Every structure is written in C-alpha cells, then in structure tokens.
Image (tube, grey):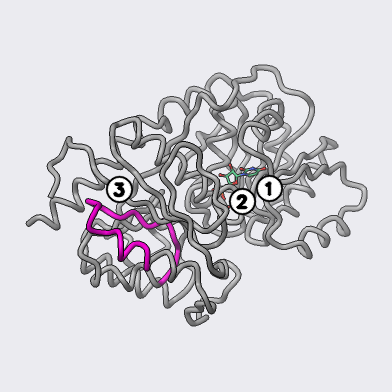
Amino acid sequence: MVLAGQSYQLLFVSTPLGPLGSGVGGGVELTLLNMLDALTQRGHQIQVVAPQQSQLPQTKIITVAGSPQIPAQTQTRQTPIHIPANSVLANMWLQVLALQSQFDLIVNFAYDWLPLYLTPFLTTPVAHLISMGSLMDAMDQMIGQIADQFPHTIGVHTRAQANTFPFAQHCYPVGNGFNVSRYQFTPHPDAYLCWLGRIAPEKALEDAVAAADRTGLPLKIMGHIQDQAYLEQIQAQFPEADIDYLGFLDTDVMQDVLRRSQGLLVTPRWVEAFGNVVIEALACGVPVVAYHRGGPAEIVRQGETGWLVEPDSVDGLVEAIHKLPEIDRQACRQQAEQEYSLTAFAERLEQWFDKILSQRGQ
Ligand code: UDP
C-alpha cells in the first residue's frame, strides 16, 4: 500500500463506447483528460487503456481493438446486460488483468456492468467513476453490490446524481475540474445563443431550439450526433428557426464559438450527472440557462452565474434568456476558477484514492 501524500501509479480504463476524442463517449472523455492533467501535475504516474484510435497526446496509452458497447441511455430499465462479440470492453479488461500488478489503483470510467463484476476478482483495487445516474436495474444492482463490498470505491460527480441510486449514501462525490486557462474570458458577447452536447433525446435539444426561436436569437449547436433521426425530426419541427449545427469540435475551436455567445442553454430531460458544458461556458464568462434538475442545478448560482428554470418549461427558458444581460460575466469566470480548477479537483481525487487504499490496507 502507498502512503497518503506519495505519488500513485494509476491505470485509467476509458469508456468502451468509442475512441477518446470522438465525442461518442460524451462528457466522460473530457473528464478523463481533465483527471489526467490534474493528477499528472501532482506527480502521479498514469497509463491509459482505451479503444483503438483514441487520441491522447503525451500519455502512455494502450489501445485495444473490438466492438463498442451500446450506450446505456438508449436502453430501458429492464434491459439485460449486453456485450457484443469481440467486445472492446472485455478486451480492455483482459489488458487490465495482465497489467494490474504494476499499479496501485485502477480507475474505471465505464458505465458498464463488467468492470464492476470483475472488481472482487482483481488483486489491485478499482475506483469506479460513475458518470451517469440510475438508468438500468441490472446496473443499479451491481453498482450497489460493489459499493457495499468495497466502501468508497463508487465515485460520482454530484449529490443529485447519487440521489438517483438506492445506495446514494455509499457514493463518494468528487465533483469535476477543468483547465480553465483553455477557455478565453469574453466580456462582451455577440447576439446568439449556444447549445452543446451529444445530440440525443435525453438532452432535449428541441426545447432549446423552441426557446431560441421565440426570442429571435440564432442558436449555434455543437456536439456529436448520437441520433441522426432525432436531429432531423427537430429540423423538420422548426423549419424557420435560425439554427446552425457546426459539428463536433475540438475544445479549442468549440470554446471560440461558445465564448462569444450571450448564454448557453442546458435542457436535459434526464438527471444530468454533472454537465461539463456548464463549467466550460462559465469558464468563458458565458452565463447558463438550465433546467432546475440534476448536476447543473447544483452548479449554477441563481441570478449570479445564470438562471435555473422550471424543468421542461420552454416559457421558463424564454423568460430567462431575456434576463441574461443581468448576469455579470466576470462572476461566471470566477465561479469556474474558484470551484472547478484542476488543483481543487486533484485534491478531491487524492482524498478519494487515499480513502480507498487505506480501507484496502486495513
Ligand atoms: N463537446 C466537445 N465538442 C463539441 C461539443 C461538445 O468537445 O463540439 C464535449 C464537451 O466538452 C463535453 C461533452 O462534449 O465534455 C458533453 O458532456 P456533458 O457532460 O455535457 O454531457 P454527456 O454527453 O456526458 O451526457
């Protein structure tokens, strides 16, 4: 066991939804990068196991071939666990099995049953960073079992996310952290709004389009298209709306559009575990209009760094968009710097890892 304050040898195991850098994995891709930056700066040694074609500059990465997992959010609560032939998830964990003795701790980024199930069979402890709320009974049951058997090993981003699970009190909230210097503070916006994220029904892009349309402001949309038919349905529903889909962009390019907007609309229908895009907007000085639910409701300060509105209310969004000029953009940047820096994140992660490892050492 490594004592607190020492540097750890960590093995990160990426999402099996797709390569890092593709956007297929959603926010977990940026979370992994941010954790890598945060912990490397503190002297920890990290290697990453990730699907083939993953892009990760300046890090030792072991890429693994195989078929991706089906996203959990496209399945129903009763869906049994699915694992395809030649599964990249299974192949990545074979690598973990072979490499585990070189590491103090394995950090799992997959929202999947298999790594949880394998935990008792491994000799190196596993920290599971759970990136979504409760979606499937089989997952809840398996996460709950590991939370019980291996205390503190189930990390979550927010309390709201933890509260979706029956074992909420056994979850360890770690928040999130960002390299705020990658986002350029912009005091004076242009006349448009932004919407960012995976284009999939649980994100309710249609509400943002409806609200922007009613205010007459153009809406710039950026993100990975997970459901093409869903996007086409929205375009058909609002043929006159001034919307511009710019694609899935690198953080540097994306923030250059985001930073000049009047506000970011965050409209998830589900309980968002965190909402990386909220902090990315605040870091640029861009206020956020979000539904009062899930992670964004724990982040946005009402009337100070944005507006939280009644969930699923387009009227509420429209009203809040009109009040965006009341928000001081400097306060938005300050919140991102003060609460979501990489340093603050690294400290929380170290405490989490220390807790897991000291428990194991008892
Ligand atoms: N994103 C990006 N480029 C884009 C649009 C989005 O890199 O053009 C990233 C964004 O930085 C964020 C992620 O997509 O990290 C969306 O994550 P979020 O936590 O908001 O939602 P999730 O997809 O995990 O449900």
Q: Toward the viewer: 117 or 187?
A: 117
Answer with the quarter of the image where residue 246 lies.
Answer: top right
**Would you place residue 142 above or below residue 133 in this image?**
below
- Closer to the camera: disc 1 or disc 3? 3
Label 1 C-beta lies within 8 Å of the nearest ligand 1 atom: yes
Q: Which residues are magenta?
A: 94-113
Left or right for 295, reference 118? right
Is the residue indicated by label 2 positioned so its CB lies within 8 Å of ligand 1? yes
Q: Secondary structure beneath disc 2?
A: loop
Disc 1 target residue: 223
The amino acid marked with disc number 1 is: Gly
Measure the alpha-carbon separation of dots 2 and 3: 24 Å
Do callouts 2 and 3 mark residues in contact (Cβ within 8 Å)? no
Q: For the C terminus, which image quadrant?
A: bottom left
| Mark closest to the chain's N terminus, 1 or 3 | 3
Tell me the residue at 61%/25% (across/down): 327
Q: Which residue is mark 2?
A: 23
Q: Find the distance from the CA under tag 2 to the CA under tag 1.
A: 7 Å
Query: Which of label 2 and label 3 is nearer to you?
Result: 3
